[in-house]
Amino acid sequence: MMDDDRHVDTSTAARAQPTSDDVILQVSNLGKQFGGVAAVSGVDLDVYRHETLAIIGPNGAGKTTFYNLLSGRMQPTSGRIVFDGRDITGLPPHRISRLGVSRSFQINNIFEDMTVRENVEVAVTAFRGDSHRWANVASRNVPIQDEADGLLARLSLSTLADRRAGTISYGDKRLVEIAVVLATRPHLVLLDEPTAGMTPDETHRVTDLIMSLRASGDYTFLITEHDMNVVFGLADRILVMHRGQKLVLGTPQEVRTHPEVRRAYLGDAEEEIAT
Amino acid sequence: MSTDNQTMTVSSRPSRKSSLRRITVLVLTVMLVLLIALPWLVPYFYIFIATEILILGLFAASFNLIFGYTGMLSFGHAAFFGMGSYVVAMLLQSFQWPLLACLLAAVMVAALLAWVIGFFCVRLNEVYFAMLTLAFGMMVFAVAHQWRSVTNGSDGIAGFSVTSFGLGLELTLGNPSVYYHVVLVLVVLAVALLYLICRSSFGLTLRAIRQNPERVAFCGLNVRRYRLAAFTVAGAFAGLAGGLMAPFLRIASPELLHWSMSAEPVLMTILGGSGYFLGPFVGAGVFVLLETWVTSMTQAWMLVLGIILALMVMFFRRGLLGTILHWLQERK
Amino acid sequence: MGSLSLALLNSLDIGLLLFIIAVGLSIVFGVLSVINFAHGALYMLGAYLAFSCINGLGMPFWLTVLVAPLAVAALAVLIDRLMMRFVYQREPADSLLLTFALLLILNESVRLTWGTGIHVVEPPALLQGTITLFGGIQYPLYNLFVIAIGGVALVGLWLLFNKTRVGKIMRAAALDRDMAQVLCINTRLVVTGVFAFGAWLAALGGVVAAPMRSIDPGMGDKIIIESFIIVVIGGLGSFPGALLGALILGLIHGLGGRYLPQINLMLPFVGMAIVLLLKPHGLMGRRASL
């Protein structure tokens, strides 16, 4: 049940590592076959509550498919997923979402014809179970408006609140996406390349936000990333995927020094970090 | 007033938004006054035109709840409209119920039919949805056409008169002017309710579903259920419109169920603009007036209809209201 | 026994004819992602053109089968270049709306040109009369001809899609239009070609059906509903699905017409509803193959 190559290295950690007796997500032998191609195969993973787990690997390594399986967007062809003690394998996305899992997408997936505030409103309304209410005036619902505004403020999006989401910059759109993801108060947040295409300033906003969320609330983060600075700055552990399989799982230090990983993937990235 | 273009400008200017709102309220109030006074202002013939516009406007607005708001294109909406007509016609013919009671029955039956048909249709993507609504709509038409013993087949149900309104009100509903005012009151009330629904959290959710159903699912909502709810509510309003139509036409016939009838709200909505709450009404007005004018000159009304729809879709997708508002925006 | 054989023959007859028509609809959807609501009207146009060619111009049937569908295909090319091109890149609703408008235009144009009456076309002299088959059944020769044509079309289309370059291009474009473009396949040509091909198939169906059925302005509506039911049962964009759906519908008409005439009209819808409940994307699944 427990992997042997996972050693919790407390000496190099800047903060207390989560302990292994509180697993929020347990993935067993997860696989997804498309015809003859295995996009994901035989992935075993235990994610600890409150940790930040980064998932790295080249394009096509199966990271997004992995997310799709976790969030219910795709049905696995093998394996099990247990979230917070519940078996969520094969559940539809809206059910998994309700249980406390939320994800962002690689390509912006927001409501382009609505204002930024309305985008968040939709998610807040859904979380509060008010989406079916047909006799109120949505734009005058103070608790929902306040919550939406609060979330926008945390992401420094307040000035854009009344702008149509389709008209704002790419980086801002991704921030709106993150706001929508957070609006449903998830316990497990799956971020799919959250800083892709962002300016350094926007990237900082995101990493600061994640750090502040970690400090203040009950969040566990899974982040797929190509930006190694973000990865090594945030991750408690790193999962390296290759061709749909788990290659290495360990602390940043372990991953950095792992011969296979080094050879295959971190060669270029290390230069990036050095310069 | 718009389904999604609430801030049509890139940056929001509260002053402009509220002045636009004030103008809209003013225009609507004036229109309402004119509508109430209509029978004394225009030639007799136009009372019939106005009644028809109001009824079809409600029909089109109910369609736009599914199309403009929830993003589902239905080609079978006349099934609920026609069903409403038949229910009222049958009840009047057999039991002479007060009109309000008949209308209530029409709404409920239409809603039920919408729930059943919607159950099959909303589970699938928009292409299947369009085909299936057309198919099921034609199925209802076929039933009405064939089932002579119940629906009197292609002859339809006629020979009924509406005598009492209900609620103890004594109204000579046979008088076109009186009936017009009854229709006006009921349609205004229905539109107000529809507007309330569109502005609610439910309406917000529907708009979100139109734009990005997947994202809505990931917010934890069962999108199918919301689509079905919207479809059923829209069917109910269409049933009300159909119910008002039966005493107006003095007949309920299968034509009211045919896909060519389903085409009318589609065209009216595209004509007026699917992105705005009042678009379907604008479209209904233009449609009926255009129809009256064209049919007086030629037999080719359907052809003209098709050409106009094609031109609107190709070049003026925003509709009349949308194009005008957009043009006004560009000028400032 | 004879009655059953007759019903089955009728089923095959109707089924294969429906296949020719429905597969055109399915192909256009598979490659262009557009449901052509006017597909039935194109079928009707083919039938009316056949009427004019045969009864009006005195053209032999064989020539009509050649000429009429081509004329409709040419019209389809015009429609594609002048109208459809505006909506291909837009959201699906727009192309649905435009083909719906096309339906109105074509329906009314036919009505205005040929009137609302019913027209009749006689089968060519060579194919008139009945033939005695096994079990002593008398079966119209022309209906056998339709079965033959259906069979030829089936084989021909299968060969087209699986053995020819054109077919491969169509299947490639169906799977990934952008990729096909990258591979320098002239997608504009493919788009127009496929749209015209679909129209050609519909019109061919109309010409072939003309001597068998009465030609009236409502025939387009009837056939489009049937085509929809077929592709829903069989699965949109699927070649074997269209065949399966068409044969099933043929069976429903053939057997239903014989044994359950009262509810015959409702049966196709009931069948469709059942399939929708069990397999929402059709018996052959979503885009099973082209």
Image (cartoon, coloured by chain):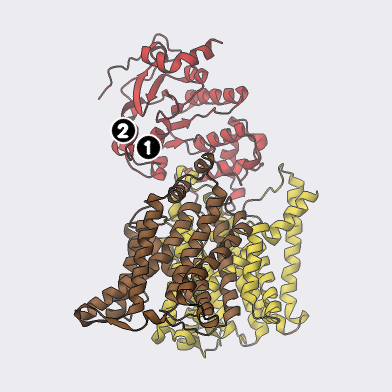
Chain colours: A red, B yellow, C brown
Q: Residue furthest right?
A: B332
Indicate the chain on which mark 2 is placed. A
Could you tell me how far apart the alpha carbons at marks 1 and 2 are, in whole angstroms? 9 Å
Circle 2 residues within 10 Å: few <14, some 14–19, many ≥20: many
Q: Residue furthest bottom?
A: B159
Q: Nearer the viewer, residue A143 or A30?
A: A30
Question: Residue B116 at what x, y percent from top left?
Answer: 40, 66
State left or right for residue C227 relative to residue A152.
left
The quadrant in which residue C268 appears is: bottom left
Q: Which residue is mark 2?
A: A30
Labels 1, 2: one chain: yes
Q: Is residue B189 above or below residue A93?
A: below
Which numbered disc flags the more N-terminal residue, 1 or 2? 2
Which numbered tag is attached to residue A69?
1
| Marks 1 and 2 close (CB-CB < 8 Å) | yes
Q: Is residue B220 above or below residue B259?
A: above
Q: Which residue type carries mark 2?
A: Leu
Q: Is residue C112 above or below residue A260?
A: below
Q: Residue drawn at (55%, 55%), measured in percent from left and top?
A: C192
Secondary structure under badge 2?
A: strand
Question: Residue A9 at what x, y percent from top left?
Answer: 37, 12
Question: Residue C244 at what x, y percent from top left?
Answer: 33, 62
Q: Nearer the viewer, residue A235 or C137?
A: C137
Q: Where the N terminus of chain B falls, by quadrant?
A: bottom right
- Is residue C191 in sight in this rendering? yes
Q: Is residue B166 above or below residue B127?
A: below
Q: Which residue type carries mark 1?
A: Leu
Q: Residue drawn at (56%, 39%), measured in percent from left and top?
A: A147
